[in-house]
């Protein structure tokens, strides 16, 4: 794997090129980029032909190892790696430990291994077994096994444990990667950890510098800020900005940085500004699952929708129906309207998820809006 | 089609797809369908559409359905209120949907019911409801209304139904009231009776038939059209249709089976995916259901195409013989298949 930063500035992030991948020796990937997140080896709900109606055939795909824990032997027999196995052979592949689309339950990691949730339930996976699986998956790059079970509420003790476990696992993974022929051409990404503690993050990043010098590590994966699923989306970008900065500052510029997770678009922009190069598509997935459609630009959308609502209310009909529907199915736009408007009835559960970036297509809200 | 884009349904070479009047009438509802000038436009489907009457869903899905001369009375599953689906209402919804072929509302009786009188009432009532449906149809020029032959498994009632409905001069005819778990020995003579009497120059549509063997047998008896949820339903359970029946991809035997479901199949699933991969995701990821639906629909469409081609080439008999000997290992044919095919002068290979 080769990574070149073409242009970098303090305020506007960096443009780069990812090339020389073992699966796509001649393909150039421009960064910042988003990988396609997968569940069980497929983009959620999308067969290969439909996926290719939406994205380029060469776009990198992210395969969480947790979906493949029971398939090491199958993949070894198959011999051609996870992209061929999943019918996505034109794509390049990244392997992460955890599935960024689902919240990882907290409190299950041990010194001897990391808990992952497979289709069959929880399994504890140690470096040896993890690396055997990675070798069989044949990715272009992969995360070292890590304990990233930290978030904004984690205690200092938990953070230290996460750092200690992960440091040990990183060393083990590096050792194994040197011994395994099948991993020679796969780039190992070191996790960047330290929870929401600036000092620990800085210390951790500095501690792994040695591995960079001897070229054991060819990239980084920003972890430990959230525990996947919607926990990433809810993070305030201002809150994590400095944490990201201290993690990335000690690192050389010429290696790629990945940040998997369902960051909301504003956080993605913040992360790009901080110098992150690689993301995944778990945010679109979460929005899809709650029947939302992402809409840009955001300001226009809100005006657009409000205007349509006004028109409808002026017409008079459906008005009652609309009000009676201010229940669990109601989402952001209505909530805003309620807060601003005269109708103060507020019975929406606070924790119900939605965001300013989407329109919720559930319920009857849009059934009479007949336009494209 | 669950999990498939209209384009994928087209790619599977589907010519005509079926919409459920009951479901479409509930959501999006006839007002919205009218505003969109029909379902073709609403779902961006530019091929033919057929709708059922909605009666079958009422009787099969709703516990509290009650059939009166006026129509089918039922409790709305949404708000518990009492509703009535009359022949007129069914046609009004179907007119809003704008299907190319519509079905009359019929009095559906569970085929396993034994009361002759109940079938007799249903047979005559179906004719009366047909008259009301025909009168209610606002678009007879572009929406073809098919009567539905009733009469359960009773030949005399089937004959009455045939006589009365054929007298109404419809663009095509459906054979209803079957495929409800009846004995195959009763099923095929009923179809045979109907196809014997139905006009030769109009399409005959056998409702709810979709197992490969049944399709081949019914074609041999002169049926032209079928509909069935079987290919997509079995896909949801992880099953793929193949020439000798179906395989369940959940089975561990496919764990390291790196070939497609069917090496001769040209569907996108067989072109790209192995049995081993499908084994890892069936009944776990929705994609597996989509992939199997694509294959199963392609299988069904190809089966019908092969039937048409063999008829064109004048070798349908050979086609049936080959199909059956592949389908049934060691030529162990069920007796009803042998009997039925013998009735249309096809002798199976031993």
Image: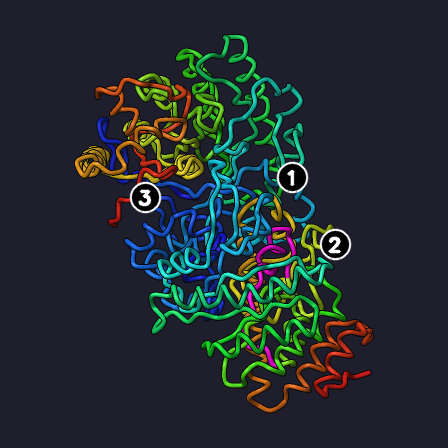
* Any part of residue A151 in sight: yes
Pinpoint the chain carrying mark 1. A
What residue is drawn where x is 59% and y is 39%? A67
Residue B230 magenta-highlighted? yes
Q: Chain of mark 3?
A: A
Q: Is residue A292 depicted above or below B230 in this figure? A: above
**SS type, badge 3:** loop
Q: CA distance from mark 2 to mark 3?
A: 47 Å
Quarter where residue A303 is shown: top left
Magenta stretch contains residue A110: no
Residue beneath disc 3: A367
Task: State the separation of the CA atoms marked 1 and 3.
Answer: 51 Å
- Near mark 2 (Cα within 10 A), the count class, few <14, some 14-19 or many ≥20, is few
Judged left or right of residue B9, residue A354 is left
- Would residue A293 appear left or right of A220 to someone viewing this image? left
Q: What element does badge 1 sit on? A: helix
Q: Residues within 10 Å of mark 3 (few under 14, many from 20)?
A: few
User: In the image, which is nearer the foreground, mark 2 or mark 3?
Assistant: 3
Give the extent of the magenta segment.
Answer: B222-240
User: Is residue A47 among the parts visible in the rendering?
Assistant: no
The image quadrant of residue A66 is: top right
Pick the front one: A88 or A289: A289
Q: Residue at x 61, y 25 (%)?
A: A114
Residue pointed to by mark 2 = B253
Q: Residue B314, relative to residue A231: is it above or below?
A: below
User: Which mark is first along the chain, 3 or 1?
Assistant: 1
């Amino acid at each position: 794997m080769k990574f070149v930063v073409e242009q970098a500035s303090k305020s506007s992030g960096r443009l780069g090129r990812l090339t020389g991948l073992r699966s796509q020796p001649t393909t150039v990937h421009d960064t910042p980029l988003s990988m396609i997140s997968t569940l069980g080896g497929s983009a959620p709900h999308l067969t290969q032909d439909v996926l290719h109606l939406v994205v380029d055939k060469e776009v990198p795909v992210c395969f969480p190892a947790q979906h493949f824990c029971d398939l090491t032997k199958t993949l070894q027999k198959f011999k051609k790696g996870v992209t061929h196995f999943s019918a996505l052979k034109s794509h390049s592949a990244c392997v992460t430990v955890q599935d960024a689309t689902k919240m990882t339950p907290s409190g299950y990691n041990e010194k001897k291994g990391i808990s992952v949730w497979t289709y069959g339930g929880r399994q504890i996976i140690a470096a040896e077994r993890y690396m055997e699986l990675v070798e069989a998956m044949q990715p272009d790059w992969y995360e070292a096994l890590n304990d990233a079970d930290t978030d904004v509420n984690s205690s200092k003790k938990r953070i230290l444990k996460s750092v200690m476990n992960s440091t040990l696992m990183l060393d083990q993974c590096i050792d194994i990667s040197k011994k395994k022929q099948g991993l020679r051409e796969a780039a190992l990404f070191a996790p960047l950890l330290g929870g929401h503690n600036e000092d620990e993050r800085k210390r951790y990043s500095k501690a792994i510098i040695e591995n960079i010098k001897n070229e054991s590590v060819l990239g980084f994966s920003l972890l430990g800020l959230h525990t996947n699923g919607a926990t990433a989306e809810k993070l305030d970008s201002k809150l994590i900005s400095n944490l990201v900065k201290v993690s990335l500052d000690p690192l050389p510029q010429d290696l790629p940085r990945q940040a998997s997770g369902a960051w909301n678009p504003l956080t993605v922009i913040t992360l790009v500004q901080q110098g992150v190069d690689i993301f995944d598509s778990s945010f679109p997935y979460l929005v899809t699952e709650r029947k939302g459609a992402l809409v840009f630009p955001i300001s226009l959308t809100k005006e657009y929708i409000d205007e349509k609502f006004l028109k409808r209310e002026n017409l008079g009909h459906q008005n009652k129906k609309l009000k009676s529907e201010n229940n669990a199915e109601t989402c952001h736009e209505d909530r805003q309207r309620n807060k601003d408007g005269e109708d103060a009835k507020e019975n929406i559960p606070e924790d119900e998820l939605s965001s300013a970036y989407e329109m919720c297509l559930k319920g009857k809200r849009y059934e009479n809006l007949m336009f494209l | 089609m669950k999990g498939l884009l209209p384009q994928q349904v087209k790619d599977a070479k589907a010519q005509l797809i079926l919409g459920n009047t009951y479901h479409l009438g509930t959501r999006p509802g006839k007002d919205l369908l009218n505003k969109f000038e029909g379902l073709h436009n609403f779902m961006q489907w530019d091929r033919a559409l057929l709708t059922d009457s909605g009666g079958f869903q009422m009787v099969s899905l709703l516990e509290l359905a009650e059939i009166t001369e006026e129509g089918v009375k039922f409790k709305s599953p949404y708000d518990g209120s009492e509703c009535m689906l009359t022949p007129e209402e069914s046609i009004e919804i179907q007119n809003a949907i704008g299907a190319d072929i519509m079905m009359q509302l019929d009095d559906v009786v569970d085929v396993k019911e034994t009361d002759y009188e109940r079938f007799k009432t249903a047979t005559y009532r179906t004719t009366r409801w047909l008259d009301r449906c025909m009168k209610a149809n606002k678009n007879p020029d572009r929406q073809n209304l098919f009567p539905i032959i009733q009469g359960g498994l009773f030949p005399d009632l089937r004959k009455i139904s045939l006589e009365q409905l054929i007298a109404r001069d419809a663009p095509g005819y459906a054979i209803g009231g079957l495929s409800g778990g009846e004995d195959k020995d009763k099923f095929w003579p009923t179809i045979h009776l109907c196809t014997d009497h139905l006009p030769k120059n109009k399409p005959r549509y056998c409702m709810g038939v979709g197992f490969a063997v049944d399709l081949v047998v019914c074609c041999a008896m002169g049926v032209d059209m079928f509909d069935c949820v079987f290919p997509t339903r079995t896909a949801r359970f992880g099953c793929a249709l193949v020439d000798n029946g179906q395989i369940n991809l959940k089975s561990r035997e496919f764990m390291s089976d790196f070939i497609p479901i069917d090496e001769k199949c040209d569907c996108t699933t067989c072109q790209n995916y192995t049995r081993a991969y499908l084994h890892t995701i069936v009944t776990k990821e929705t994609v597996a259901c989509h992939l199997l639906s694509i294959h199963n629909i392609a299988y069904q469409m190809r089966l019908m195409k092969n039937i048409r081609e063999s008829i064109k080439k004048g070798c349908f008999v050979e086609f049936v013989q080959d199909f059956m000997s592949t389908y049934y290992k060691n030529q162990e044919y069920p007796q009803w298949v042998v009997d039925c095919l013998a009735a249309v002068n096809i002798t199976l290979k031993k």
